[in-house]
Image (spheres, rainbow, N blue to C red):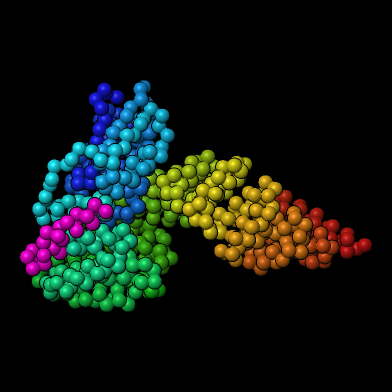
Amino acid sequence: MSAEPYRFDCHRDHGPYAGVAGFLARIAAERPKLAVRHEVELHAIAPWLDRAARPAAEEAPIRFHPARRTAHLAYGAAEFVTAWAGTLRHPVTVRFDHTADADETTAELLAVLTGRAAPKLHLDLHAGGDPLPPAAPGPDDLRTTLGDSLARGFYHHAARTARRGRALVTPDGDLRHWWAFTTGLATALAALEQSAEALALYDEARAATDDPKIIMSAAYSTAMLYARHLPGAAQDPGRARHWLDQALTLAATIDDEHQRTISTVFYEQGVALLDARSGEPARALRMVDDGLARLTGALAAGERPQDVARLLHNRAQVHLALRDPAAALADLDTVIAQDPGNCEYYADRAALHRAAGRAKAALQDYGTAIRLGPHLPEAYYNRATLEHERGRLDRAQDDLEHAVAIDAAHLDARIALVNLYLERGAPDAAEAGARAGLALSPADPSLLCTLGLIRSERGDHAEADDLLSRALDGDPDLVEAWTNRAAVRFERGDVAAAVSDLDRAVALSPAPEPRFNRGTALMRLGRWAEAAGDFTRALATPGLDRATRRDLRAGLARCEREQAV
């Protein structure tokens, strides 16, 4: 590390990742080989490092990035910084100014960095700093910034930029810019789960102008809010269809035939989405097929490849709804060939490979999704479950730990990790993981159940009983909780209560374990005939392992001896 001090300005007026992007770029310049391993997140955070890239707003992405992507970028960037810090010979202090006025992306990454243990790296965070020179960008500059922020998935900055733009123009004075800022703000708000405010913006646009292009675009965007983005109870397929009909009616009036075809096909995909969701996948497939035929017929060779890829991806989802995975796979292969940089497609294809038993191909696609994502917790989780099925427990544990580190609230990954710790004989790690999960989701039945099992194995039957009872309050159909609480109550000497819990477990599950456990409890009560019935039925379960079959036969033999006395 050079002697020149590290000092970076994080004020949000400098844009997303202000300060931290410069810090990462400096490390990348000094450690280029290390940077190669993290180039996806580095190029997303500091795009000037990617010399081959065009401005993000010119890339015409198939769909906007999810808002949570910045958390994944922060995780990868923190890994990069931690690896660099591990190579330092002497301590280094990095000063960041204006952290109190930082963009959300910068604040998120700094929070991750400060949570990492890097002994030779000290982050010196200053809320203030030197005064910034005043800047007053005009509508053109703000519109460029807005488009870039939306395309890169930096929605808080996009929303601020759009609000600044709307403050400078009016629909009467500059309708073109006003609409760009209004629809850009609505897009950012929808991504940030503030869809009600986005809906109000489109209502405002309809009241402000009768421009058919704006009304058409607002109608389609309103339809998608009702179909996808509003909270569950507020979603309304009927209203979504109403607005799609209006968008299609206006699209039919477009003079230019080429643009008319593109707009019409694009809007029809919303109708196909609603058809698929309403249980009409065959009708949705016909609409997607027809749209593909008309779109490819209207486009020149190589024109708008991502629009074609979007329809092919939609068709793959419809094929899955029609239980035709081979057709879905063929579409995904084509989509990936056309747009090889989209992580979502690899994750979708991995699921198809896995369902078909092609584990090696699935693992390869999950790996690519993780690399391109970057660091998708869901891909780590899915790869971990596949590795676990293949008996590769070290790899499964590593992937699950990554998933939880990236997204602490990923409960499926946390539950799987806790159970894997138990399986591998690490009860301390399992208990710590369960309690960490419950700190985030105190009423999660699976975590309560697992922690109850851990406490019971450690002899704390009172706490275990309470935890398992809370799990059942949240999910009365959780078989494992009935079975585990029965075991706790059996150990505490309340055999009748244990039998009652196992009655519920047997009613819910055809598995042999609840019947075996109930048979054992019934023997303690001297109810030999009922116990024999449970052992007999459990023995009829296909695929029993040798040890379970032996124990069931031993229990049945004892029942028969006792009944013979």
Q: Looking at the picture, tell me which residue is in the foreground, 449 or 322.
A: 449
Residue at the spot 24% in from the left edge and 69% down from the top edge: 200
Residue at the spot 63% in from the left edge and 66% down from the top edge: 508
Question: Does residue 366 show up?
Answer: no
Is residue 162 toward the left or the right of residue 522 in the image? left
Where residue 446 appears, as percent x and y from the top left, is 56, 57
Let me know if residue 165 is in the magenta part.
yes
Q: Looking at the picture, tell me which residue is in the foreground, 138 or 11.
A: 11
Residue at the spot 15% in from the left edge and 69% down from the top edge: 214
Q: Residue furthest right?
A: 565
Residue at the spot 77% in from the left edge and 61% down from the top edge: 495
Task: Read off the magenta span.
Answer: 156-180
Question: Does residue 34 show up?
Answer: yes
Where residue 281 appears, as percent x and y from the top left, is 37, 71
Residue 512 versus residue 104 in the image, above or below: below
Q: Quadrant of the N terminus?
A: top left
Let me know if residue 99 is in the magenta part.
no
Q: Looking at the picture, tell me which residue is in the foreground, 319 or 565.
A: 565
Q: Quadrant of residue 111?
A: top left
Where residue 313 appears, as percent x and y from the top left, is 32, 60
Where residue 297 appears, as percent x and y from the top left, is 19, 64
Is residue 224 toward the left or the right of residue 261 in the image? right
